[in-house]
Amino acid sequence: MKLLAGLALLATPVSTVPAAAQTAPAPTAPTPPAPAASPAPTPDYTQDAAWLCRPGRADACATNQDVTVIQANGKRKIEKFKPAAMPQFDCFYVYPTVSTDTTPNSDMTAGPEEQAVAAAQAARFTSKCRVFAPLYRQVTLTALRAVISGQPVTLDREMPLADVTAAWNDYLARDNKGRGVVLIGHSQGSGVLKALIAKSIETQPIRRNIISALLLGTNLAVPAGQDVGGDLKRMPLCRKDDQFGCVVTYVTFRADTPPPANSRFGKVPDAGMVAGCTNPAALAGGKAGMDAILGAKGAGFGSAPMGPWTSDNLPVTTGFVSVPGLISAECVAKDGFDYLAVTVNGNPADPRTDTIVGDVVVGGATLKDWGLHLLDMPIAMGDLVDLADRQAAAWRGTPYKPRRK
């Protein structure tokens, strides 16, 4: 297996490459950096081809989201997915580091990796909102591998933000029309959205249209003991289900495998600052059961495959699985890290699985400093979708109608 080739769904910006990788020794005879190329033109987001997902299309965000619900006693049922007929708000989604292009910055062609991650992370939100997901020239896995292995690489770190900003401006001009918006990102996508909020949203009138920002798998700096004032100056962390104009953010680790000292997830370098953590299932704090919606076969190419879901070895025929009561989580602060600590409440006496996969595995070795990065969204997917809907209702000033379970 090529170095990190198994991380096609691993959503990590170069800025969060683990310290051990960032300090790898340089080659003895380093190749001089390539001369800077002329700036490439910004993609034309008035063209629908520049978008990974747009409403009304048969694209990645229109894929089947049926889920098999498996109870502790092994009983199963399939919940059919229904996109909203008349969604009342919008979702603007920026996907994580997935591109396998051979260049440091990706092209504007949606490959199977971009399509797969949008289907896994964004498509379920179509049950509540119109989903807009721009293609953008992200920092690729190729560049990530080069950084990790100490190879020289010339990449444009400003290009992703420039592209997403252009897409955002096109969305506002063509599509928004005063609607409320939930911003959704994971890892590199969250980092880009964090910068977009700071530079183009917080200080502009459009801030009034932001229902919430789900910035997952990234470190969002906030002053210790406070909810706002670090990376973002006006948008606080969400602390109530009906709060809007706020941020949900966390990084995920197993409760029994906390972040090791070399992890870049869950801490920030600035004095007096901590990484924000908000559990979407318990915004006020404390431990809560998670409405996890997991991949039936596992957490993507970066993790080990999932074994049988029940002791009878019956196959699962849907792409997703829900396991009520199996998973709980809480935000914890420990040893300088702030993170969402996940507990798997397995019971050997019942027929349902007692474990889940999702750790990053390379060459058979588990990279503990990455935690459950692959599960940042799936571990709380049902909670995130419901929370976005509840916050949107509060933003509109209308009663919230919870989904039937």
Image (cartoon, rainbow, N blue to C red):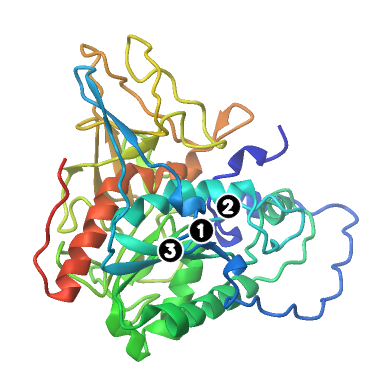
* Residue 313, position as x, y percentages in the image: 38, 11
- Taking depth in this image into account, of 399 and 3 the one nearest to the observer is 399
- Taking depth in this image into account, of 49 and 308 the one nearest to the observer is 49
Q: Which residue is labeled 3 in the image?
A: 55
Residue 95: mark: 1
Disc 1/disc 2 C-alpha distance (Å): 8 Å
Residue type, numbered disc 1 = Tyr
Residue type, numbered disc 3 = Pro
Residue 177 seen in render: yes
- Comes first in the chain, label 1 or label 3: 3
For image coordinates 20% across by 66% down, the residue present is: 391
Q: Which residue is labeled 2 in the image?
A: 114
Instruction: Check disc 1: other Cα within 10 Å, few if <14, some if 14-19, many if 20+.
Output: many
Residue type, numbered disc 2 = Glu
Under circle 3, the secondary element is loop
Under circle 2, the secondary element is helix
